[in-house]
């Protein structure tokens, strides 16, 4: 049958293209990860009726999972036309020195500590910016209300945790990368902070137009245009932005098919880059085609928000 016994008494499955066996039972009667993984996969496919299974581990285990999938197919547990199994391998996260992340005492850094440090740093930066704004307002004899303590904490959590997630997901998942708080919390470049700030800018345009939120803006525009809403792309930057927006659905397809979140991060960064070019060139609120430009801003904001949501990252309405 499929399982072969060696002279030493071990039971194995020999998978084509592999020079070593897939171990089912050791000669002393013990079982291995091969055994439990095969049993678990059979249970998921037969009992839970799962159509697709995705295993996420480091790239070093790719060979094991390729053998697992082949053994399951040879055993009749998995049918190629009904089931799909994927192994998503990821590289290592290293420190600025290129070595394994450790504390100053030489101990391994816990994930929770790594994550919580980002909101703490983000909060400190936000407090400094608020103080600078308040001081400048005082110098001009103006009153600056600023953000409440609750808003500062909320913003720090959204930006901090989002920055870590985005920085990780934007990498080629099979490659190792250097972990850097300074880089991930930067306003410049392909970072969650930069994207969240761009979203705030998009939303501020609606407020400057005298509308509190996007739902109200769309309602207002619909009332002014009973014939239906549409966007006329009249300038080069509008065309570039509009055409890029049309790639959103295909980007989702590519991300899910290839199991590559960096497809979405690349799309969102390019989206913000094209929006910034449009924002800098166009006089949105004073333009004759103001409504077209406002609608283009709203569509861009919605796509940016949804793209970040798919990556598990939130946005903010103001900073």
Image: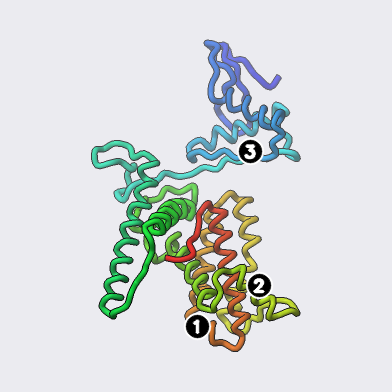
Q: Quadrant of the N terminus?
A: top right
Query: Within the image, what quadrant is residue 214 found in?
Result: bottom right
- Sequence-first disc among 3 and 2: 3
Q: Which of 38 and 119 is in front in this view?
A: 119
Picture layout, residue 174 above or below residue 183: above
Q: Position of residue 277 (x, y in %)?
A: 49, 77
Residue 22 visible in the snapshot = no
Q: Residue placed at 60% from the left, 54% from the top?
A: 255
What count of labels does the image hold? 3
Q: Are marks 3 and 2 in contact (CB under 8 Å)?
A: no
Q: Where is residue 189 in the image (x, y as percent from the top left)?
A: 42, 65
- Sequence-first disc among 1 and 3: 3
Residue 219 is tagged as 2
Per the model, the C-alpha gap separating discs 1 and 3 is 47 Å
- What residue sits right under mark 1 in the picture? 281
Q: Nearer the viewer, residue 266 or 316?
A: 316
């Amino acid at each position: 049958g499929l399982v072969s016994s060696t002279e030493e008494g071990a039971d194995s499955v020999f998978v084509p293209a592999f020079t070593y066996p897939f171990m089912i039972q050791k000669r002393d009667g013990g079982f291995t990860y091969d055994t439990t993984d095969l049993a678990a996969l059979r249970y998921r496919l037969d009992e839970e009726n799962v159509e697709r299974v995705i295993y996420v581990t480091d790239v070093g285990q790719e060979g094991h999972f390729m053998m697992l999938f082949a053994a399951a197919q040879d055993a009749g547990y998995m049918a190629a036309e009904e089931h799909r199994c994927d192994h998503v391998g990821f590289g290592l996260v290293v420190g600025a020195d290129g070595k394994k992340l450790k504390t100053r005492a030489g101990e391994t850094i816990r994930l929770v500590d790594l994550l919580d440090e980002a909101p703490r740093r983000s909060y400190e930066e936000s407090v400094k910016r608020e103080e600078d704004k308040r001081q400048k307002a005082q110098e001009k004899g103006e009153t600056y209300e600023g953000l409440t303590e609750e808003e500062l904490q909320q913003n720090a959590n959204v930006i901090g945790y989002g920055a870590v997630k985005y920085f990780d997901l934007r990498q080629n998942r099979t490659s190792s990368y250097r972990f850097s708080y300074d880089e991930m919390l930067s306003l410049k470049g392909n970072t969650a902070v930069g994207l969240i700030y761009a979203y705030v800018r998009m939303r501020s345009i609606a407020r400057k137009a005298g509308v509190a939120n996007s739902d109200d803006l769309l309602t207002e525009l619909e009332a002014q245009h009973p014939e239906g809403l549409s966007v006329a792309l009249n300038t080069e930057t509008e065309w570039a932005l509009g055409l890029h927006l049309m790639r959103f659905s295909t980007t989702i397809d590519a991300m899910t098919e290839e199991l590559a979140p960096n497809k979405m991060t690349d799309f969102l960064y390019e989206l913000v880059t094209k929006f910034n070019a449009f924002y800098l060139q166009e006089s949105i609120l004073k333009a004759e085609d103001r409504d077209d430009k406002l609608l283009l801003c709203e569509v861009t904001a919605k796509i940016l928000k949804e793209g970040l949501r798919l990556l598990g990252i939130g946005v903010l309405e103001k900073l």
